[in-house]
Image (tube, coloured by chain):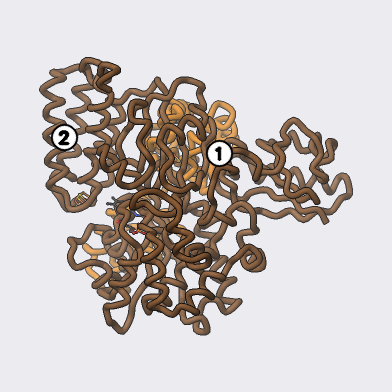
């Protein structure tokens, strides 16, 4: 029976994948052919979604973007044998966007049936856990440290060191918490994994539990991701039935759903939220590794971090650490988003330049207009101008340019963008999402938004810009967490790199 | 407490005021503590929304795809402002900050179903779906 793949990924569904799947089934029924329709995750080539694939002796052949009205003609062209059609892409692996990637964390995403444990195993699943058991808990933590893997949630803290702290803290109970809050605009790597390869997270968290001596894990997923929540919950039930979770496995997992608060992605706020409280940020110390969920030692890691653990363990720390540049080892799933011609998930070793990502891989803008600004690292990340396109994508290089890579989101804007409005939005977002604990963040952001409105209206521009710049200083030094503390990044970078949008003289090209 | 609040909202469409003392007692908390939690999170409503809920993304990646102008068109089409409900109670439109569909923007979600590349024809689809 011919296998046809139509993604169930929320972004593919958002552009009509369900209707395409239905049309394929109806067309097959009409023609009296039986086929095995699999709902896979997305390969992450979003400009081609809905992208369907057919299994043929020559490998999987992709077509896209497919609409329901194309389906009949696709069958006429011999879809089931990978036949010709204007939408035929060929083997997905040969598409340059995929060919140039190094997929470790996303090795299976878009290929397997997300809820098939057989598929998961057939594609290398549970090799990481087996190797962890061979090395023992201490050896596993050492391996994670040696791999150089750093937290993919934004702060870039070395994962092995975090785990060692929890492993070395004795307690009657310890927890593994997966941060799947993914609130950053321009990011969807967590979502794709939850929907496209949920077992990798189960395996990663099981390894973490084994390494530090924790028997219970929570996956905190934002409520904006209903599909992801559903798939993950089903995967947990399947893993329990197979004895991969539960008493036999010595590790339990539960999904918890957020409630629409960006700040709950901050780790201490997330723990408060898991405990059923308002998601207010806790002062550190104590570190979650010492006193985390319910006061117990807790590993809290980003979802991509945990989903990378099986790959690191399966092929060894060295293979992972051999990739990357400087102190940024391994691969990063970069999410090319916004006004990009070839928007999608691009997993690659650290070190590509921003220009390569935006222009070569992303192909410039979707609108066809020139790229003017790029925001990297979510709403707290800096805006970059073309003059900074030589910045290599790694933690330190971005920090050196007063930016951050955050969770790997790269949002492209064309030349219609008004950077004063973007700076205003950054302040407004801070005001909307502030947890309320610090005055500069709670009140200052509201004043900042009003002041930026005056700048935009042309009311005493210089004096008001000076006020905004002062406020940014106060936010930077008077905030307990990065929501207030990093809001100055987008604001100040917009003012610095795009002065002409604030009524200041344009930067001379040479000085840019 | 979040799972309980989500259940309440799924059943009643909001966290009705009379539920607060009930939840407080069940969890051995004060009413103020429960109220504090309900009001902290954007998801929880104190009044029920319309029969359909359309959430439109207002975050950066959707802004870059002209999302604000598209959102304005949708709001105007139904004569609503952010957070508003049509007089016949059919539709509520709310702002949301990122749905994780950022490479297929502008994005929205209608009754939990994701919608990407929102434009003139998708707005018509939405209209049809909510029956207006
Ligand atoms: C306002 C704010 C929002 C954050 N949102 C997230 C998020 O959505 N996901 C995430 O993994 N980390 C987020 N973080 C970072 C976490 O606090 C924490 O560093 C991370 O979960 C640690 O995991 P890692 O070491 O694997 O990156 C956020 C931080 C701040 C200050
Ligand atoms: S900076 Fe803002 S979000 Fe962070 S703790 Fe302070 S008030 Fe809360
Ligand atoms: S920014 Fe709109 S979906 Fe992510």
Q: Residue at x 16, y 43 (%)?
A: A476
Find numbered disc 1 in the image and state the secondary structure of the residue it sits on: helix
Write down the residue under mark 1. B130
Query: What colour is chain B?
Result: orange
Q: Chain of mark 1?
A: B
Residue positioned 21% across, 61% down in the render = A282
User: Foreground: B56 or A281?
Assistant: A281
Give the class, few, some or many, for how many residues have Cα within 10 Å of label 1's Cα (few <14, many ≥20). some
Q: Is residue A277 above or below residue A167?
A: above
Q: Residue furthest right?
A: A32
- For the N terminus of chain A, the image quarter is bottom right
Which color is chain A depicted in?
brown
Q: Is residue A346 visible?
A: yes
What chain does mark 2 sit on? A
Q: Is residue B45 visible?
A: no
Could you give the CA–CA distance between mark 1 and mark 2, rounded to whole angstroms? Answer: 38 Å
């Amino acid at each position: 029976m011919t296998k046809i793949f139509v993604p169930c990924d929320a972004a593919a569904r958002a552009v009509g994948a369900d209707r395409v799947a239905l049309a394929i089934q109806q067309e097959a029924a009409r023609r009296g052919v039986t086929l095995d329709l699999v709902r896979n995750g997305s390969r992450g080539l979003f400009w081609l979604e809905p992208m369907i694939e057919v299994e043929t002796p020559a490998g999987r052949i992709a077509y896209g973007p497919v609409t329901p009205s194309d389906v009949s003609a696709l069958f006429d062209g011999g879809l089931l044998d990978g036949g010709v059609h204007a939408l035929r892409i060929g083997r997905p692996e040969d598409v340059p966007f995929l060919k140039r990637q190094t997929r470790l964390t996303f090795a299976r995403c878009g290929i397997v049936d997300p809820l098939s444990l057989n598929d998961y195993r057939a594609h290398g699943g549970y090799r990481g856990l087996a190797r962890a058991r061979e090395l023992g808990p201490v050896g596993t933590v050492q391996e994670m440290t040696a791999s150089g893997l750093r937290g993919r949630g934004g702060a870039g803290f070395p994962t092995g060191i975090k785990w060692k702290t929890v492993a070395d803290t004795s307690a009657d109970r310890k927890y593994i918490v997966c941060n799947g809050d993914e609130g950053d605009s321009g990011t969807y790597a967590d979502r794709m994994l939850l929907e496209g390869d949920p077992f990798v997270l189960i395996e990663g968290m099981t390894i973490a539990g084994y390494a530090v001596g924790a028997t219970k894990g929570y996956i905190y997923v934002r409520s904006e991701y209903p599909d992801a929540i559903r798939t993950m919950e089903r995967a947990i039930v399947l893993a329990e039935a197979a004895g991969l979770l539960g008493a036999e496995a010595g590790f339990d997992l539960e999904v918890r759903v957020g409630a629409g608060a960006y700040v709950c992605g901050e780790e201490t706020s997330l723990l408060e939220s898991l405990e059923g409280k308002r998601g207010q940020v806790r002062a550190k110390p104590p570190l979650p590794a010492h006193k985390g969920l319910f006061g117990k030692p807790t590993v809290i890691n980003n979802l991509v971090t945990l989903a990378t653990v099986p790959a690191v363990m399966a092929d060894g720390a060295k293979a992972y650490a051999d990739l990357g540049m400087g102190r940024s080892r391994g691969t990063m799933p970069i999410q090319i988003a916004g006004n990009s011609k070839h928007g999608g998930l691009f997993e690659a070793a650290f070190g590509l330049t921003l220009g390569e990502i935006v222009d070569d891989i992303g192909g410039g803008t979707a609108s066809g207009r020139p790229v003017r600004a790029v925001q990297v690292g979510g709403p707290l990340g800096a805006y970059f101008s073309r003059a900074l396109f030589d910045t290599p994508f790694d933690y330190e290089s971005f920090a050196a340019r007063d930016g951050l890579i955050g969770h790997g989101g790269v949002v492209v804007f064309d030349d219609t963008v008004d950077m004063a409005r973007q700076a205003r939005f950054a302040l407004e977002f801070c005001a909307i999402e502030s947890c309320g604990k610090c005055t500069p963040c709670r009140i200052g952001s509201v004043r900042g938004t009003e002041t930026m409105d005056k700048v935009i209206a042309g009311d005493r521009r210089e004096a008001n810009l000076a006020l905004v710049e002062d406020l940014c200083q106060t936010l930077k030094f008077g905030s307990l967490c990065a929501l207030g503390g990093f809001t100055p990044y987008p604001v100040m970078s917009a003012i610095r790199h795009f002065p002409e949008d604030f009524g200041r003289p344009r930067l001379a090209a040479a000085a840019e | 407490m979040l799972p309980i609040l989500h259940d309440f909202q799924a059943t009643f469409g909001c966290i009705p005021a009379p539920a607060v003392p009930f939840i407080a007692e069940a969890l051995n908390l004060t009413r103020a503590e429960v109220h504090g939690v309900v009001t902290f999170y954007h998801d929880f409503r104190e009044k029920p929304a319309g029969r359909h809920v359309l959430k439109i993304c207002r975050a950066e990646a959707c802004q870059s795809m002209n999302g604000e102008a598209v959102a304005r068109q949708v709001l105007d089409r139904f004569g609503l402002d952010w957070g508003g409900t049509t007089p016949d109670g059919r539709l509520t439109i709310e702002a949301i900050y990122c749905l994780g569909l950022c490479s297929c923007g502008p994005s929205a979600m209608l009754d939990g179903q994701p919608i990407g590349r929102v434009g003139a024809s998708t707005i018509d689809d939405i209209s049809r779906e909510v029956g207006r």
